Image (tube, rainbow, N blue to C red):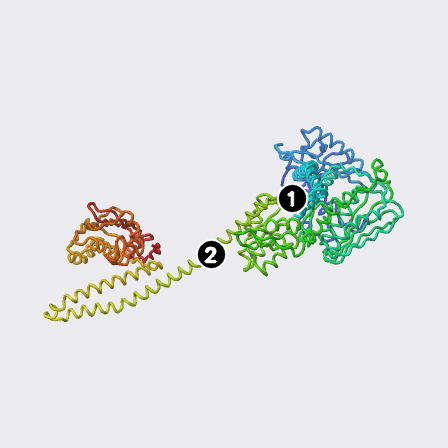
Amino acid sequence: MSPRASYIRLKDLTTVKPVDDSEDRIFEEVELLKQELARARAGHESGLMRLLSARVTMNSTFQFCGLCDAEGVNWESNKTSIRAADVKRSDVHGVPFWECGWWRGAPETQEGLKAAVRRAAQGELVRYDVEIRGDPEGRETIILDFNLNPVKDRHGNVVFMTAEGRDVTEQRRLEREVARQRDELARLDALKTEFLANVSHELRTPLSLLLGPAEDALADTEQPLPPHQRERMELIQRNARRLQKLVNTLLDFSRLQVGRMEPGFEPTDLSAFTAELSSMFSSAAERAGLVLAVECPPLSQPVWVDRGMWEQIVFNLLSNALKFTFEGGITVRVREGPERVVLEVADTGTGIPASELPRLFERFRRVEGARSRTHEGTGIGLALVRELVELHGGEVRVASTEGRGTTFTVSLPRGNAHLPAERLRARRAPTPMAATAAVFVEEALGGTAEARTPPGEVAVPREEGAPPGRVLLVDDNPDMREYVRRVLSPRFEIEVATDGQAALEAARAHPPDLVLADVMMPRLDGVGLVKRLRGESDTQAVPIILFSARAGQEAAVDGLEAGADDYLVKPFSSRELVARVRSTLELARMRREVARRDALAASLREAVRARDDFLSVASHELKTPLTSFSLHLDRLSREMDEETRASFGPRLEVARRFVQRLAGLIDMLLDVSQLNTGRLQLRLDEVDLRALVAEAVAGMREDAARVGGSIQFESDEAVVARLDRLRIGQVVGNLVSNAVKFGPGKPVEVRLQATETVARLTVQDHGIGIAPRDRDRVFQRFERAVSSRQFGGLGLGLWIVRQVVEAHGGRIHVGETPGGGSTFTVELPLKGPEPAGTGDAVTAPRGRPG
């Protein structure tokens, strides 16, 4: 016996009690294990500790597990499995495994389990999914990832088997959902591909009817088109060919996706054919300032290709290189190896980020933010290249370094043994390729194809009476740029830019009256241009119209949220374009005019504020000497003897009245300045309104008697209100003074009444009255219902009265006195203005303009 084994004591094992049904047994085993661990040393564990460790581990796991003998009899089941089936340990101890409570009621499951036991007894690991009861009541079914693992002795005989089950119900549900979604996506993808194929077929008919007549008109020598009309027809032809290329690409790609592409492979001098295809890009490369090198030495034997597909492969790779290369050049190489022929298209362009390389050949994939000559393209060119190359039994790879260039490598197997025999055919006559190449070149060059726009061309004179405006037109497509320029130039001054960055620099140098920009552009797109222009002080107010082929509310919202003033969806008519530009310019002009008027209004408000401040200061300054003058008059009157008083008294009284009148005018000016600036303060207190009105009336009786009139006052017993004593006294005085003034020699009736919430004061005269049309006007500043020459006054008294009444939360109106004259009615809330609080100082609202 080994030294290690000597520590396993038989008596330790006998302390473990036989299997029973009590929960206490598990806790007892845990307690025993705890004691054994306290005594143990690493490498010197007791056999009891090992046994207990295994039992505690098994009973503590969340998964279903147990132990069977080689015949499939169950001898041990962990706590989780016992509780899940709601059985006693004695119910499943020593029972054939397939008859335990987990499997009852499912004969097919039991039969499957018997077969699994037989296989495990032969030494095989058996694993499969099985459904069992998930709760004691059998209301829930769960799925177990179940396995039987045979345990062998040193002779290779199976003596036990462990049973284990892992709950994978949710995982299987998710897997089914993922599979369902994958199938649904595959179905939708197939439907979309089928739709693209159908649409492409349908588009070919109208395209043929566009291209055919256009080409006939351009080729007609008997009735040649005038130069201006010929330019328009060439524009139609170029863009119809480009549309035809897009349609053909979509059709080819959709046919590839559904397996309907029917290639015809024929033996081809691939080196000469590739050189011929590449030569069609020579003039375009030269125009772009690039060097196109073609290295295609003769091959030892023909290569089997579909010539139309190979044409698309070469044209796509070359146009891609031309689109992203701004200096240096492009190299096309064809070379052969022992088993394969290789095509390389290398450029010294902008390169591709390493993160984008793994997904470069995915359909609709575009490298975001890449610098290119044009933003045009479908995003399926490289995906189509890969599909076409794979149809040839070949493969395509890409290597790139950002900022240094990119190399695409296409390799094809030699011979034809790898190709379907039914797709092999004899060599046919070559088909014209120039028209197809021209479309690829135009798309790749984009903004560099300036040869079609003659340099130094004289702008078309603007229409007479057209609104002035300089429009900055931004588009990377030369045909669209030229078309829009010709539509707008008779009406506006046009400046052009080929991309957003060039437009930004032009706008900074000389801000235009309007920017008209495409959304999809290289370097800086239309939305980016809008954000940059809005972020700079010199251009933030320039109106901007975006136009794009992206239709729908979302596309428009993106542009408008960026700060654009309008969004135009292609295709648009020339009339709509002119109308949008004209209306946007007019709105911008109106906004500038409103801003100018706002600035003027702000200046006027500042002038009025300065005037009111002056009036306030001047009124205070005037009151000081006037008060002193009044005091001296009073002192002089008191110190006169009887003889002097008899002689000079009437004169002093006239002077005193004029001093009081002048003091009233100064107070009025002070009130005007305070009301205009919102500085009128109401000092609120509980006031006997009856006494206040009586006092004001008594002060005016002498003035009424002087002109032969009289004042009568009637009032309820007691009227107490929360108000500013001084200001309400001013209101009563003004109204009574006006009644005396405009009804000389006539009686004036003053009445004060009260309800539970409101005090109502009426001042009624029998004078000249106020015409109905003037009754609202008399409460405005500097307004009168009568001539100022006859009655004098500043036209401010009633305006001040209204401001004070409304500051108290009340209202005032004027009506006709029966028999002639005017009746003014003032209503004041007894509780005072809101917010109310005894002794509060309330700021009156700013006076309404007269």
Whether residue 43 is visible, yes or no, is no
Q: Nearer the viewer, residue 92 or 631?
A: 631
Ranked by sequence position, the earlier of labels 2 and 1 is 1
Task: Examine the rendered structure and indicate whether residue 85 appears above or below residue 343.
Answer: above
SS under mark 2: helix
Residue wearing tag 2 = 595
Q: Position of residue 332 (x, y in %)?
A: 80, 52
Circle number at residue 28: 1
Task: Nearest to the eye among marks 2 and 1: give it.
Answer: 2
Q: Nearer the viewer, residue 229 or 555?
A: 229
SS under mark 1: helix
Q: Nearer the viewer, residue 232 or 256?
A: 232
Q: Amino acid at mark 2?
A: Ala
Q: Is residue 198 left or right of residue 156?
A: left
Quadrant of the image occupied by residue 403: bottom right
Q: Position of residue 167 (x, y in %)?
A: 67, 39
Q: Amino acid at mark 1?
A: Glu
Quadrant of the image occupied by residue 153: top right
Q: Is residue 413 left or right of residue 229?
A: right
- Image marks 2 and 1: residues in contact by CB distance under 8 Å: no
